[in-house]
Amino acid sequence: MANGWRRGRLRAALALLAAAIALAVLAPWLATHDPRRAVPEEQFQPPSATHYFGTDLLGRDVFSRTLYGGGRTLGVALLTVLIALGPGLAIGIAAGYGGRWLDAGLMMLMDALLAFPSLILALALIALLGSGTVQVALAVGIAGIPSYARVTRAAVIQARSLPFVEAARALGAGPRAILWRHIVPTAAPSLLAFAGVTLSWALLNGAALMFLGYGGDIAAPEWGVMLADGRAAFRNAPWVALAPGSALSVTVLAINLLAGGLAEHPADG
Amino acid sequence: MLTSASMRRRLPVSLGVLGVLIAILCLAGVVVALLALRAGLDDKDGGNRIVYGLTLNPSGFDPHIHISNELGIPFYSIYDTLIYRHPQTMDFVPGLAERWEMAPDGLSWTFALRRDVTFHDGTPFNAQAVAANLDRITNPELASGKALALLGPYTGYTVVDDFTITLHLSEPYAPLLDGLSQVYLGMASPAALREYSKNTYQWHQVGTGPYRLEEIVPGDRIILRRNPEYAWGPVFYAEATDQSVDTVEFRFYTDPATRSLALESDAVQMIGELLPTDVELLLGNTQLRVLRVPIPGLPQQFFFNTKRAPTDELAVRQALLYATNRTEIVDAVFQGQSPVAHGPLTATTPFYDPAVEALYPFDPTFAQSLLLGAGYGDSDNDGIWDRDGEPLRLTMIFPSWNQTPEVAQLIQSEWRDIGIEVELIRVPDFPTLRSYALEGDFHLIAFYDFGVEASLLNQFYMTGGANNWSGFSDSELDGWLHEAVRQVDAGTRAALYSSVQQRIMEQAVVLPIREYVNLNGTTARLDGVIFSAQGWWPLLRNLQLRP
Amino acid sequence: MGKFILQRVGAALAVAWIALSAAFVVLRALPGDAVDATLARTGTSPAEVAARRQALGLADPLWRQYAAYLGGVVRGDLGESLVTGQPVAQMIGQNFGPTAALAGSALLVGVALGMALGLAAGLAPRRAPGWLAEGVAALALSMPVYWTATLAIYLFTVVLAVLPGVGGGSPRQLILPAAVLGFHTAGSIAQVTARSIRRTAAQDFVRTARAKGLGEADVTDHILRVSLLPVIAVVALQLGFLLGGTVVTESIFVRQGVGRLLLAAIDNRDFPVIQGIVTLTALTYSLIHALADVLYALADPRVRVEG
């Protein structure tokens, strides 16, 4: 089924994402200025040879901030996915593999979590734990647990009814052995694909909380924070928002294209 | 045929389901259209009309109960106060009271009231009306926030005759007149107060002012209409003309970034708290005007925590004051639209003492020598100074409003240059800010309030004051602050407040940044824009809209 | 069928109750309360602050506050605002209209645009329209609302000056926020539609139908009937998202609505208002899901057996 266009798209997406990660990792070497240092005399300089993406209200270099910001933004997103993945998997497996009552109860809890406005959840967590990157990852991650739980549960239920799993059960294998030897490996690929898809969700939501100002150290470069700074300055200096806004969109686009491609492939094969 | 039939069974979606979906959507569309249409109909009414952009949602609308500064913007024109402060001179001028007199012992004030005033509901204004208002405000059930506090040591009243009332105090109280000139002590119709409960009166406010309240939809709009009978205004109110504004519709523009847009696109004809960075753009537009209104009271500032190391040391606090380039902050963040602040009061506040201006010039070298004297130095050469192995690291707490985050980041960058590290914590709302303050979990914290009366300082600087977040305590200062409230003579008060301001700055209790200036924008067609002495509240009476 | 509906509605109520209880606990964990947000700010003495807290019932033990609140909710009484004294139901009522108008029109934009993009991408995957549609859908999914909104306001209000950027009150002011929010919604609707069409097109019965010599139009008709089923679910999900997810849009476009009411209530620690909004959104959300499930079940009897 694979055709040239799809493969090309996948390659382009992969290249974009790799570039984003590389730029974030290499920021200390690529940056032209200290991303935190304010130089008020150089406020709102347009893009130039010294400041590739111009400067912001406090005269900080937007190019360097965008590079450094990538690491923080992507890091939070990865952490978010990991935070959602663990409990999501556990709850999904318990619901899909446990009894009917356990399943109903857990899924109802997950529904309640989904129905709970995520903003309040995030605010409460941040109020409890203080603002900061890890707290943002926790806030977004916890809101994401229900989706993981649902997908895991569906995968487990599907795997459980596969002929070889039923055969194993008929042969007298214990439930734990069946779970670890058969069900988890069978369900893993689709879960991994799902984690990929949700990375873009984590990026957008993490940046949104940063945008709203819950990211802790506000002077540290981060795309959501920069977008918020840039929005206030948009009429004087659109470049302050354009750089992080485009970086965020392109990164998410790459992940979406990649994840979309991956999600289709297992179904094809 | 057989295939087709079995296919039908495998194709369970009937077009009926799609139909239901489409029907629901269409219904939603109709509802939307109806709502939109209804909103459109509301807009059609004649007369001279402006839309005024408010910058935050007041948490409550009843001036007797609630505390928000913002509520004064619409409601100061619904009410009259017994006394006004002249917007330019800040002198007390007659309002609903024609004359007033303090008893020689300072324990009572007698007010002679105007006899020609009627409330919007047609009932007459008299001494009984004043009494009803005082009864309401002092009723503990009402839980008055600000109005009650403004009355100070008030103990009761005597109605002398229909148009004379005496207020009694337990001790002399100089700020009383200022309190009586604020919207929180505006005179409401006793009939309306009786008709509505303490919770519902706010939607049906009835005063004697130049505008009547027509409608409040919280979070959406407040509509005022001109009171054609109004003829008892203070001296600075002009006569109505046929260009007077008949209807003022207040709408909420809580996001600073889009306020200038609302003004330019003519969605509003007047709006406050523009972003300093937008002012230059607006000045280039001949259709618009920018009015800079200084706000008396405390400046935008940070309190030092005098109870926690290392800001418990005077030398450290003083070093931090010398290390702060306030001019740079004002120029960069506020685009030079606000004056630099030097002391605990702003320059437009009565009893301001300019002596504080000479105290802490920007001098990073001197700041470092003060720190050296206190035992600090960069022993490990990491760029951050330290003492006994403890790096000089401070925590700064501030809210998201008034560009404080930008100010904080600039301070962080400035102080880093001389070896001081600052951790910035931005909090989302006031209760969080307050909880940091109460726990003492900070070195610097942003907090301030506004008002013309210098006695505003008491709650911030007196030992145990309700908002004394710095934890500062100085018995001599307490004595001066207390005495200044009891002394009615302006000269005596000025001397006391001079000592107060100088002591606060000598002790470096606070890091003042800039004097608050409200950047208002209006259409150039709007004349007669004046603000009350408090600065925040426009007086709508004189507004004239040219065609 | 009746039993199934009853089950779903029961589950929805239970979900709302759990969300409400969670909100109740979570809110008490926030620093400060309504008295801190209002009275304490003016320098009122600690004794008066404490008295006020007592009067508002904030000093009662938590279980008593919870019991009182739950009792009220069961009787249909959401309580009164701690700040303005206004009944919470009335406050939400006043703000529901504008939010529904925004969510409704955004959904219209989202469904129309999303279906169009999804159909193009699904039915013409290897041609220019499909390629283009897929690109637009991917873009819609990649741009956060606060970023699209900033760009849209700049483009349509500042540069072109054709639409009012912010504020509420006139229907014209609904256009931009509805378009921005709808654009976002269109992304996921398009994706699901396209994926579902492709999956259906690859199924046996389509090949059989083609082999049987059915016309291409008839085949498309069959594909669409099957593949639009998942779209119902996604539209329902999006409606839930829109009703709860207008907070950012309402703030940026400065529109009245439940989202901004919620933000203000959080700032003021106005617990009854927050709890009321949580309860109602959770209820709406889970009832919409229940409705989608029922529609699904009506359409496909197998669902009932598995559910």
Image: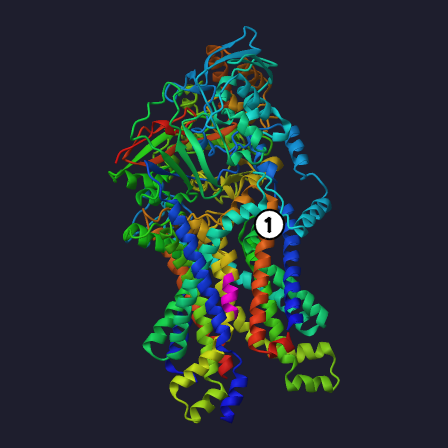
Task: Relative to A176, say whether B398 is above or below.
Answer: above
Q: Can residue B249 be seen at all in this image of the molecule?
A: yes
Q: In which quarter of the image is residue C46?
A: top right
Task: Relative to B70, say whether A231 is above or below.
Answer: below
Q: Which amino acid does label 1 sit on?
A: Gly
Task: Relative to A83, say whether B145 is above or below.
Answer: above
Q: Mark 1 points at which residue?
A: C276
**In screen coordinates, is B230 left or right of B6?**
left
Q: Which residue is drawn at 65% across and 49% down?
A: C24
Q: What percent of the width, then of the height, locates residue A167? A: 69, 87
**In screen coordinates, is C233 left or right of C55?**
left
Disc 1, SS? helix
**In screen coordinates, is B268 left or right of C266?**
left
Around disc 1, counting alpha carbons within 10 Å, would you say few (fewer than 14), some (14 to 19), or many (20 or more)? many
Which span of residues is magenta-colored? C233-239
Q: What percent of the width, then of the height, locates residue A34? A: 40, 50
**Relative depth, front residue between B333 and B536:** B536
Q: Quadrant of residue B386?
A: top right
State the colouring used for the structure image: rainbow
Q: Residue at x 46, y 14 (%)?
A: B494
**Relative depth, front residue between A11 and B237:** B237
Q: What percent of the width, then of the height, locates residue B131? A: 56, 19
Q: Can residue C143 be seen at all in this image of the molecule?
A: no
Q: What percent of the width, then of the height, locates residue A16? A: 40, 68
**Relative depth, front residue between A89 and B56:** B56
Looking at the rendered image, the quarter that the C terminus of chain B falls into is top left
Q: Which residue lies furthest to the left in this view?
A: B286
Q: Is residue C305 within the magenta segment?
A: no
Label 1 marks which chain's residue?
C
Which secondary structure dominates the residues rendered in magenta? helix
